[in-house]
Structure formats: structure tokens, C-alpha cells
Amino acid sequence: MNAATARAEGGMNLNGRTIWQHAAGDTDRDYVDVCIQNGVILNGPGRAGPWPAQMDEVVGKNRRPKKLSDLRRFCEDMRAGDVVVLRLGTKLVPAVGVIVGDYEWNDAFGDVDGWDLEHVRRVRWAWVGEQPKEFDAYAIKWGDTTQRLNPGEVWDWVASLKVDELKPLDLPELPSQKDAGEIGFDRISDFLFDRGVASASIAYLMTEIGELTRIARWYERSSKDGSDGDQHPNRPSEHETVAYLVVPLLRALGWTPQRMAVEWNKVDVALFESLPRAGDNMSVVVEAKKLGRACLAARLQATGYADQREGCLRLIVTDGLRYGVYVKQSDGNFGLHAYLNLTRLRDGYPAYRCGGAEDAMLAMSPDWRAINDSARDGG
């Protein structure tokens, strides 16, 4: 069916409207849910500020000139009323919507699983599939984040959706990072103390966290200088980040070597509620990825390990710098409880609707379960 036939049968009228395809990550780093839940599409890098003030920053990072063209299309060429096809890879479409309003810059999206995506367009999603619509491989163009969609299979499908007649999702309130700013160690210390963590444990954590933050910042700086990608000579391996960042942080939070096992039964780091180190006693699965890789995408792998252990109520996914903490919910699924970036400590992440550094450190500590039980009992 072509677009004209679709219109004749009551489909969407695409006359005079631009249809865009916009990537929401890829099969390794997927932020589709962030886009749909917040009514947005995102582009980056955007940490340097609103477009076009940060153009020199993009050029200075030796990015390809086409990235500037990509950002220009997103920030300047898109218009209210244009149609957006949200893509994942080259054959999956999770959602279709219509652009609302003008370009915005929003710091709440400054860390989307490690990517700074502060350039924002509001989108009223008209079609969201229970499962992404799948097309033949490469039916959708690969390449830039934001591109015009070419006529063809996907175009015809969009025209047939009757998007103008669908009841669109409500446009949610845009999250604001003003409500979740950067915080210091003193505030984290007070937060943990107020929730019952021992003073000695907090003092040790505050001593160690400064050193871990310095190491994390060094990794971040040194792995960006010169060549890019996994082959950068200063980019640490997964084993190195576990040794120098993950294990020291867990030790500082109060986990003892007896209750920590590295590479235990295919689990990168297993944490135990009590001894012996047995499956029935495992309370936390820690899944580590190489520095710079998507850490939140590791949730599915970590869940596979945790689902085999009834007493395992927490997952920690990390690349050494960033930590996503998932907690088992009443429906049996693991939900994102808190997110921590060692190089940018914040008290919340509105884009993810989850807590920040304080909640993450508490949930990563061995005291978390006892503190929660005490709170439920009114203690």
C-alpha cells in the first residue's frame, strides 16, 4: 500500500508534513522508555549548553562534521506538526508521534546511561506498540540520529496508521534537573546516618569515595584524549574497573571479602546476605560492563541470574563509573530504584524517575535490607 492509497482509505495525511526517523539508542544502549515516558526525543552531545552555543565544543571533540549537520536538523529543521518515527537499529520502530513546540535544552537528560542528550524535542506519542514494529533489515536508514525518512515500506506503514485519528498519549510534564541537583559528600553522609548506617562505616566510605571519584574522573579524562572507542590505550578492561572501582566501592559501603565473591557461578560479583557463599544466601547480583558501555542494558543479564535465587532482591549494573541499582518489586520484576555517577553526584534522576547518589549508596550497602525491614516495622 502506498501513501496515497492509505490516505484514500482514511489513513494519515502526510501532504506537506516531514516524516523524520530518530534513533533512541541501538540494540546495546536503548533509551526508548525514557523517550516515551517523558514525551521526548533526544540528541547530543549537549553538555556544553543550548544550540548553537555549543557548536565549537562539538568541533573541538574531533567529531565528524556530519554530527553538526545531525544536530542542526534536530535543533533547527524539525517543526511542530512533523511526524517522528522512533527507531531502534535499522528494523525496529517502537513508537510514532508528532512534534510539539520548539527546540529545548534540558539538563535532566545530561546522563542517559552515560550519554549527554540535553537537546530535546517534545513529542506527543500517537502510536506505541506493545512490541516494536519490525521491518526487513535496513528498511530504516542507518547513520545519523535524526534523518528524514525516505518513502518506502516504513513510510507507507506510517501513512496507514491513521495517526491523526489515534488518541495520543498525554504530554507529560518535562522533568527538571533543578529539582535534583549535584550534591556533596557531607549531604550523602548525613543521609546515610539518618537512616541508621553506622558512623564508622560512613566515615570509612567518605574517606574512600573521594579517592574513587578521582580515579573515576581520571579514567573519564584519559580515555577521551586521542583516539576514541574501545581500542583507546587508556580505556580500562572490565576486569580493571571491577578491581579498582567496583570492589573498592562495595568494600567502602561495608561489604566484607567473606560476603563478596568475584566471578562466582558466571556472576561478575555476587554479594551474600550471610555465610556460607551459597546460592540461597546470595542477596545481590553485580553485573559489570566495560567502561563507557551501556550499564543499564545489563539488567536483563543480571535478572537472569537473580531469578534463580529467591532471596536475591537487588541488582547492581555498572561500568565502574555509573551504577544502576534495581530492586525487586511486588510484581516480581526489578525496577530502577536509583542511579549513581561517581563523576557527577546527584540527588535524583527525574528522567528515569528514580533516586540518585544517596539512595543508590544506601541500596548498595549491606545494611539496606535491615534498614528497610526496620522502617516497615516502624522501628
Image (spheres, grey):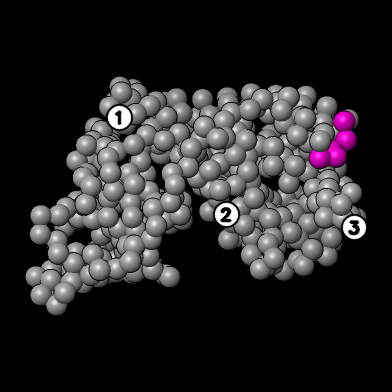
Task: Please tell me how crowded label 2 is: few (under 14), some (14-19), or many (20+) other residues with Cα within 10 Å.
Answer: many
| Helix, strand or loop under label 1 | loop
Residue interval drawn in magenta: 195-199
Position of residue 248 measured from the top left corner of the image (x, y, whole percent): 74, 35
For the stretch drawn in magenta, what is the main secondary structure? loop
Identity, as a three-letter code, of the amino acid under mark 3: Pro
Foreground mark, 2 or 3, reads 2
| Helix, strand or loop under label 2 | helix
Which of pointers 3 and 1 lies earlier in the amino acid sequence?
1
Position of residue 160 measured from the top left corner of the image (x, y, whole percent): 21, 72
Identity, as a three-letter code, of the amino acid under mark 2: Ala
Foreground mark, 1 or 2, reads 1
On residue 298, the disc is 2
Which of pointers 2 and 3 lies earlier in the amino acid sequence?
3
- At a point 84% along the width and 60% down the height, the residue shown is 281
Task: Choose between 231 and 54: the one closer to the eye.
Answer: 54
Identify the residue under disc 1. 51
Separation of disc 1 and disc 2 at Cα?
32 Å
Identity, as a three-letter code, of the amino acid under mark 1: Trp
347 versus 285 height, above or below: above
Position of residue 108 measured from the top left corner of the image (x, y, whole percent): 48, 38
Separation of disc 2 and disc 3 at Cα?
27 Å
Determine whether, in the image, residue 153 is placed left or right of residue 60.
left
- At a point 66% along the width and 68% down the height, the residue shown is 331
Separation of disc 3 and disc 1 at Cα?
56 Å
234 versus 78 height, above or below: above
Foreground mark, 3 or 1, reads 1
84 drawn magenta: no
Task: Choose between 108 and 379: the one closer to the eye.
Answer: 379
